């Protein structure tokens, strides 16, 4: 699969949130405002790239040769948890303003299905390191696009007259349904499915 | 947290089903609810797998809660949960390969299912084994209920079948409402379900 | 005591050890079953197109050219794999045969699977128009029309068509006793 296709497929055609349903908890939890969405997207991009690289190296250099494939799930999630811890400590000490901007989202990222999912896809799709990087970038970009777009919509919904039963989550879900419908239009774009 | 009389054992079980239903009230565990409910059977399969992990991890965490140091409890929870996830992963591969193929990456993703880590931290770490078992069971039933409803509705409208058996006339099944099977349909349906819940007293209390 | 530095490290270490041990056991226990499932899936992929009702296949000859097809415990037919020399090379054919020796469906290996016949001519043997003719035919009908049988050859590709038809007929004749179980005799 050539590089552009990998990126575009991850970014639009198989958008991780709107088409694959992965990463929904932060999607609905953080998308109440555009500013928080941008912050979360940046954090996700950072962790997703790092986690992809570290898990990839660990898998191919350690787990596979030693026949320890069955430890994959445990190792990957621990890697993510550890990475998030380190990133938090690093930012707190050396990049204080970034930490205060992003700080609250970092612990949330550990349970962000999207990061773990990407580490698994990198293995299942048999990517090499470059392809895995592109895939992670595309996925993070797709995540950002979906969450920022959605936050903009929700900000407008705040002032809209909505019946009480639908206020909050229900109308958010239905909004997501419509955005997802729009993204379905990307299917078979550039010959990718 | 209410300051009334200590909740009865049974309430731990029943609260998870309706009052504190993980997906519709607590709004956690959404990813598999939408992704794996294209048919009723897949949804139920997913629920059973997650339930296994939830109940086992609740019991184990509760059993060791007095000797686990506070500061490293989260990594230890994660190791415990991922152990059970890997167990159900391999068992499913061996004995239910068709289900495994359908659920795909969502089986290992059980490890980040907010419900499981959430209950370990919020409940099992502070309660006895039997209570934790009941809590896990209750939440599992609640989770399974929602997945079953979603799966049944989506399969009914999207394919005209139930557990693979046709229940709508062939004319419908030739041109079913594909919307229900695709992602937008899932979002739409859970939105309607949540709106329905909001209309009831429970929903109003949780808003 | 619970929070002592030693116990912090030790508890993590012990948890990891126990987990790794438990998982290695599960892995070893489920491995044979997983391998078996993979084989079943592989066979289904290879033979499912010509024998859709079967869920299990067992080789019936040492060279695996004949397989028995089962649905549950009941035998529902057989699979024949044969390859006869065509125009550019061997033409591999897989056929599903019912218990009366009639053909259910056939599959001809595609170009990507090694078929070396001429594109536009012999390669058309992989297409449904040619293949569907074989459904329902018994061994006596397995000849090209120009040879006295009932199969239409592909225009301009007689050699390939004959390779498929005759190869199939000869295989069915050769293994007839295996394909059509004699009533009253258990064919295990």
Image (spheres, rainbow, N blue to C red):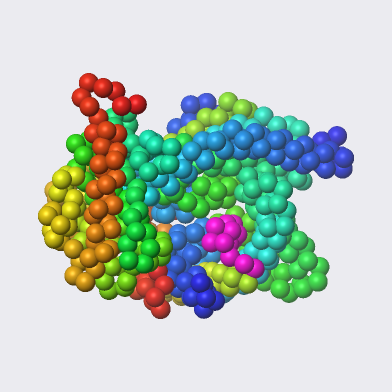
Q: Is residue A100 above or below residue A70?
A: below
**Can you see residue A29?**
no
Residue B41 drawn at (x, y percent): 35, 42
- Corner quadrant of residue A79: bottom right
Above or below for C102 versus A25: above
Between residue C149 and residue A28, name the one nearer to us.
C149
Position in image of residue C166 (x %, y %): 25, 53
Q: Is residue B179 above or below residue B104?
A: below
**Does the magenta portion include A117?**
yes
Identify the main secondary structure in magenta: helix
Left or right of residue B83: residue C111: left
Where C137 falls versus C119 (above or below)? above
Q: How many marks?
A: 0
Residue extent of the magenta highlight: A115-129
The residue under the point 79% across, 41% down is C13
Q: Is residue A69 left or right of residue C126?
A: right
Of residues A171 and B82, which is closer to you in this image? B82
At x 65%, y 52%, the residue is A77
Quarter-wise, where is residue A133 in the image? Answer: bottom right
Residue name at image x 82 percent, y 36 percent: C2
In the image, is B145 to the left or to the right of B162? right
In-image side of A171 versus B78 (left or right): left
Q: Position of residue A187 (x, y in %)?
A: 37, 71
Indicate yes or no whether the magenta region holds residue B7: no
At which x and y percent is residue B65?
70, 34
Q: Residue furthest front?
A: C147
Do we see residue C87 in this rendering?
yes
Q: Residue C107, located in which quarter of the rendered image?
A: bottom left
Q: Nearer the viewer, residue C140 or A31?
A: C140
């Amino acid at each position: 699969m050539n590089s552009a296709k990998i990126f575009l497929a991850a970014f639009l055609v198989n958008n991780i949130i709107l088409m694959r349903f992965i990463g929904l908890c932060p999607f609905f939890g953080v998308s109440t405002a555009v500013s928080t969405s941008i912050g979360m997207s940046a954090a996700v991009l950072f962790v997703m790239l790092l986690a992809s690289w570290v898990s990839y190296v660990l898998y191919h250099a350690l787990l596979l040769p030693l026949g320890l494939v069955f430890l994959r799930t445990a190792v990957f999630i621990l890697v993510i948890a550890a990475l998030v811890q380190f990133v938090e400590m690093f930012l707190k000490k050396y990049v204080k303003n970034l930490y205060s901007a992003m700080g609250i989202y970092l612990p949330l990222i550990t349970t962000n299905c999207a990061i773990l999912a990407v580490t698994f896809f990198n293995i299942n799709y048999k990517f090499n390191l470059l392809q895995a990087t592109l895939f992670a970038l595309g996925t993070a970009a797709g995540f950002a696009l979906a969450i920022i777009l959605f936050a903009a919509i929700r900000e407008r919904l705040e002032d809209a007259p909505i019946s009480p039963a639908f206020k909050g989550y229900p109308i958010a879900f239905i909004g997501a349904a419509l955005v997802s419908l729009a993204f379905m239009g990307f299917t078979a774009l550039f010959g990718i499915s | 947290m209410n300051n009334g009389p200590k909740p009865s054992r049974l309430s731990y079980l029943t609260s998870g089903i309706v009052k504190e239903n993980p997906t519709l009230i607590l709004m956690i565990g959404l990813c598999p609810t939408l992704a794996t409910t294209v048919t009723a059977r897949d949804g139920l399969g997913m629920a059973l797998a997650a339930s296994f992990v939830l109940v086992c991890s609740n019991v184990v965490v509760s059993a060791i809660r007095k000797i686990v140091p506070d500061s490293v409890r989260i990594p230890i929870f994660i190791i415990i949960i991922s152990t059970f996830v890997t167990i159900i992963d391999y068992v499913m591969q061996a004995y239910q390969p068709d289900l495994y193929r359908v659920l795909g990456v969502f089986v290992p993703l059980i490890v980040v299912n907010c419900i499981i880590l959430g209950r370990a931290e919020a409940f099992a770490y502070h309660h006895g084994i039997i209570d934790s078992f009941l809590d896990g069971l209750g939440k599992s039933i609640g989770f399974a209920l929602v997945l079953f409803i979603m799966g049944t509705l989506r399969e009914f409208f999207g394919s005209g079948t139930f557990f693979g058996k046709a229940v709508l006339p062939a004319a419908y099944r030739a041109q079913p409402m594909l919307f229900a099977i695709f992602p937008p349909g899932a979002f739409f349906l859970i939105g309607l379900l949540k709106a329905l819940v909001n209309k009831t007293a429970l929903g109003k209390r949780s808003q | 005591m619970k929070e002592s530095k030693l116990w912090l490290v030790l508890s993590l270490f012990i948890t990891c050890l126990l987990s790794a041990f438990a998982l290695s056991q599960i892995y070893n226990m489920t491995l044979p079953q997983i391998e078996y499932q993979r084989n079943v899936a592989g066979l289904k992929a290879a033979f499912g197109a010509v024998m859709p009702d079967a869920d299990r296949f067992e080789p019936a000859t040492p060279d695996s050219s004949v397989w028995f097809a089962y649905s549950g415990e009941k035998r529902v037919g057989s699979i024949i794999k044969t390859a006869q020399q065509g125009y550019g090379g061997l033409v591999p054919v897989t056929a599903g045969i019912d218990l009366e020796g009639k053909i259910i469906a056939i599959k001809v290996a595609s170009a990507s699977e090694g078929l070396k016949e001429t594109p536009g001519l012999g390669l058309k043997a992989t297409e449904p128009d040619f293949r569907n003719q074989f459904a329902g035919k018994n061994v006596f009908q397995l000849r090209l029309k120009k040879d006295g049988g009932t199969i239409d050859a592909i225009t301009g590709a007689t050699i390939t068509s004959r390779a498929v038809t005759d190869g199939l007929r000869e295989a069915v004749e050769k293994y007839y006793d295996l394909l059509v179980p004699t009533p009253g005799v258990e064919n295990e």
